[in-house]
């Protein structure tokens, strides 16, 4: 294992990647890396093999944050990120400034070309965070264009994001294959998230209600959609300090919930000042 090459400009990235014909994988992140990100990097390494190139991007994307969200306080831990990414098998870390990605203003201009996520961008997270997925899809498209990967790894923890990015790659005929990677959890069930570090000890205990609610829905899924969701809401109500944004069930593509077969249960809530999301695959008998 060698230390990753760290670059911060497109010119440096182009120089590092120039002329390489080896398979290439990219892991787009916003930094503050944790073992869940390490799993993405390991999956990327496995995908391209020992002779391939694994690139991790570390960029806190301003255009996916709405007014009053945590852009300014989002954790920025690049030195630690480089160590974790390298230990997991990363070759190159691309950590650009916003001006490098979006030009001198560092944000979209009012007349910038962006990617419309379509109707699926307005439900669940999109309903709570208007414009969020326009920012996500646009920056992911830019990062894929800049890094030129054969494959890109995205975690199932951000499930709606994964679905929309996969849909974007297919609908726009992008040459990159989108690869999902399973959610990594703590032993007590809490899904790993960079925002978990905001939680106090008491809030972290409260946060466990999200994964418990998902398991409750799964356990009751054979009793019908409404009863299953009610079981999840009953669990969430055990922690009245947790402000729930939504608990819902869809098909795997975020369409209407199926009467039978594979489905997805998604939940989002605010624990203290920290907003967390989680989801779980379930099988409706």
Image (tube, rainbow, N blue to C red):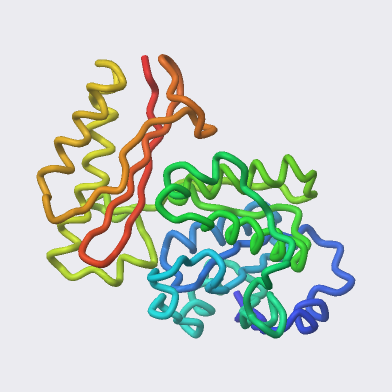
Q: Is residue 274 left or right of residue 79?
A: left
| Residue at point 86%, 74% (across, down) | 18
Residue 185, given in percent of the width and then of the height, sits at 34, 52
Residue most extreme to the front: 110
- Tally of numbered tags: 0
* Quarter placement of the N terminus: bottom right
Residue 54, given in percent of the width and then of the height, sits at 67, 65
Q: With respect to residue 46, does 172 lie above or below?
A: above
Residue most extreme to the right: 19
Residue 246, given in percent of the width and then of the height, sits at 32, 43
Observer-nearest of 175 and 237: 237
Observer-nearest of 96 and 181: 96
* Quarter placement of the C terminus: top left
| Residue at point 48%, 55% (across, down) | 130
Residue 158, given in percent of the width and then of the height, sits at 46, 51
Q: With respect to residue 78, does 209 lie above or below?
A: above
| Residue at point 36%, 48% (across, down) | 278
| Residue at point 37%, 61% (across, down) | 193
Q: Is residue 225 left or right of residue 123?
A: left
Q: With respect to residue 118, does 200 lie above or below?
A: below
Quarter holding residue 103: bottom right
């Amino acid at each position: 294992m060698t230390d990753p090459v760290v670059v911060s400009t497109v010119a440096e990235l182009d120089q590092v990647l120039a002329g390489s014909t080896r398979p290439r994988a990219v892991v787009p992140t916003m930094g503050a890396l944790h073992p869940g990100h390490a799993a993405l990097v390991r999956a990327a390494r496995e995908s391209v093999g020992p002779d391939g190139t694994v690139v991790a991007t570390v960029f806190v994307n301003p255009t996916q944050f709405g007014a009053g969200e945590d852009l300014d306080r989002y954790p920025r831990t690049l030195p630690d990120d480089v160590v974790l990414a390298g230990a997991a098998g990363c070759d190159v870390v691309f950590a650009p400034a916003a001006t490098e990605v979006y030009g001198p203003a560092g944000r979209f201009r009012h007349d910038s070309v962006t990617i419309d996520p379509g109707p699926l961008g307005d439900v669940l997270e999109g309903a709570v965070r208007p414009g969020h997925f326009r920012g996500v899809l646009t920056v992911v498209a830019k990062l894929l264009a800049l890094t030129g990967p054969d494959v890109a790894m995205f975690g199932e923890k951000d499930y709606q994001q994964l679905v929309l990015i996969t849909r974007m790659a297919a609908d726009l005929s992008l040459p990159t294959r989108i690869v999902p990677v399973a959610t990594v959890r703590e032993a007590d069930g809490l899904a790993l998230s960079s925002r978990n570090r905001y939680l106090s000890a008491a809030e972290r205990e409260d946060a466990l209600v999200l994964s418990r609610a998902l398991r409750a829905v799964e356990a009751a899924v054979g009793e019908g959609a409404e009863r299953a969701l009610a079981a999840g809401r009953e669990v969430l109500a055990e922690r009245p300090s947790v402000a729930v944004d939504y608990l819902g069930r869809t098909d795997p593509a975020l369409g209407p919930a199926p009467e039978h077969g594979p489905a997805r249960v998604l939940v989002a809530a605010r624990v203290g000042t920290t907003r967390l999301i989680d989801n779980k695959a379930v099988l409706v008998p």
